[in-house]
Amino acid sequence: MSENLGQTETSAVYHERQRLELCAVHALNNVLQERLFTQEIADEICKRLAPDARWNPHRSFLGTGNYDVNVIMAALQSVGFEAIWWDKRRPLEQLSLAGLVGFIVNVPSNVCLGFLSLPVRRRHWIAVRQLDGIYYNLDSKLKAPAPIGGEADLRVFLQEVLSQGPCELLLVVPQEAGEARPWLNTVR
């Protein structure tokens, strides 16, 4: 592939690497396993969400990305998917994985300048997706997709991520699944 755009070839798993503050764009593309979104498309979504805003509240003031959840939700809706906020008060045992496309997770992340880690934390979007029976951490800060394992391993991974502090878990589902709520297993 001559125009790599940050994609790695690990097991044919699509994985974009971090550029600027575009982790939301990378998370969207990584969870959907193709390059559907760009910075320009995300900026256009921001303009539609706040058409009269002098400074757009949905992205970085500097124009380098740092998109908020509204941009992610609108982007997914534009291609026939929906982001469902997982209520962290629910035990992960109630999460049914059937019908899920994947996950987009907002996690705290250290700010680094080269090899120097600053005592400042920012928010970072990562994607998790199952391919060929294996769940992968598709964090754009990783050099390559990181295999998580099967369903039990995924639940351990998600529990560890959710215990890191302020963190949000979005379930990515087809839009037609929205009302049926197949991701919620209330039977214990």
Image (cartoon, helix red, strand yellow):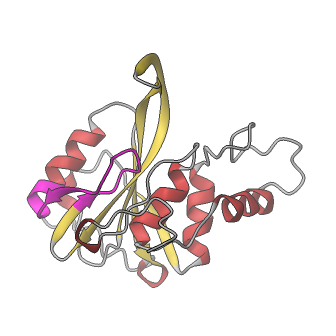
Q: Which residues are magenta?
A: 136-154
Which one is nearer the viewer's eye here, 174 or 22? Answer: 22
Residue farthest along the top direction in this orientation: 119
* Residue lying at the far bottom of the rendered structure: 176
Q: Is residue 2 above or below residue 5?
A: below
Q: Is residue 142 magenta?
A: yes
The structure residue drawn at horizontal position 40% and vertical position 66%, both measured from the top left corner, is 31
Residue 183: x and y, percent? 30, 70
Left or right relative to 151: residue 137 = right
Query: Toward which corner of the image does residue 131 lie, by quadrant?
Result: bottom left
Query: Residue 5 or 89: which is nearer the viewer?
Result: 5
- Indicate yes or no whether the magenta region holds residue 120: no
Q: Quadrant of residue 95?
A: bottom left
Estimate the x, y position of residue 81 in percent, counting from the top left.
49, 76
Residue shown at the point (35%, 30%) measured from the top left: 165
Residue 91: x, y in percent? 21, 50
Q: Position of residue 75 (x, y in %)?
A: 60, 67
Relative to 105, 182 lies left or right: left
Give the position of the N terminus as an image quadrant.
bottom left
